[in-house]
Amino acid sequence: MYYAIVAALMLVFPLASILVDASVHQVQPGWFLVGKWFVFWAVGVRLFLAGLRQILQPRYTAEKILGIRGDDVLLVVRELGFANASIGIVGILSIVATGWVVAAALAGGVFYGLAGINHALQGHRNRLENVAMASDLFAAVVLLGYCIWVATR
């Protein structure tokens, strides 16, 4: 289930939304739509859902994704959930508050980049952490690429 959710929120839903939006508005897909829809799905929906799960079930992230056992880590995972949910809310609301797209892309891109690098530095990664690492680094490239496009146009 984890793999399907990550694939849907990080690739399938953003790409489908870009194509539908471009078709409806009869425009070429480009960085503007990439930013809009990757922020909504990858930053907004994914981080919000991840945050909710980390708040309500911190043991799943600790044990299944990070491979850490014990109750001491649950407080920290729950705090990560608050941060993820907060960034996610900004990403979700950016669909109506369009001025928030760049800020959400920057925050999400930096977060995903640092999280992906952190996963990469762990020598004992399991399959779920490998998926998290790859999707985090992919999201960072897309989101920070969008930010660079905005800054240079």
Image: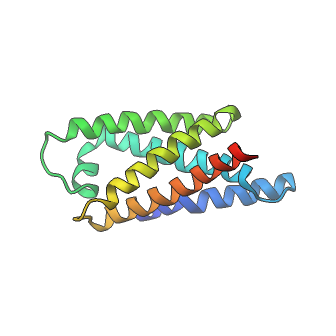
Q: Residue at x 66, y 39 (%)?
A: 95
**136 and 96: which is toward the camera:** 136
Choose top left, top right, bottom left or bottom right for residue 2: bottom left
Q: Residue furthest front?
A: 152
Choose top left, top right, bottom left or bottom right for residue 28: bottom right
Location of the N terminus by quadrant is: bottom left
Q: Residue at x 51, y 53 (%)?
A: 140
> Can residue 9 be seen at all in this image of the molecule?
no
Query: Where's residue 54, x and y in %?
Result: 33, 42
**143 and 84: which is toward the camera:** 143
Say whether residue 104 is left or right of residue 129: right
Q: How is the image coloured?
A: rainbow
- Residue 96 higher or lower than 116, as above or below: above
- Number of disc labels: 0
Query: Where's residue 37, x and y in %?
Result: 65, 50
Say whether residue 106 is left or right of residue 128: right
**135 and 64: which is toward the camera:** 135
Query: Where's residue 113, x and y in %?
Result: 45, 51
Say whether residue 59 is left or right of residue 44: left
Q: Residue at x 31, y 68 (%)?
A: 127
Q: Residue at x 54, y 42 (%)?
A: 44
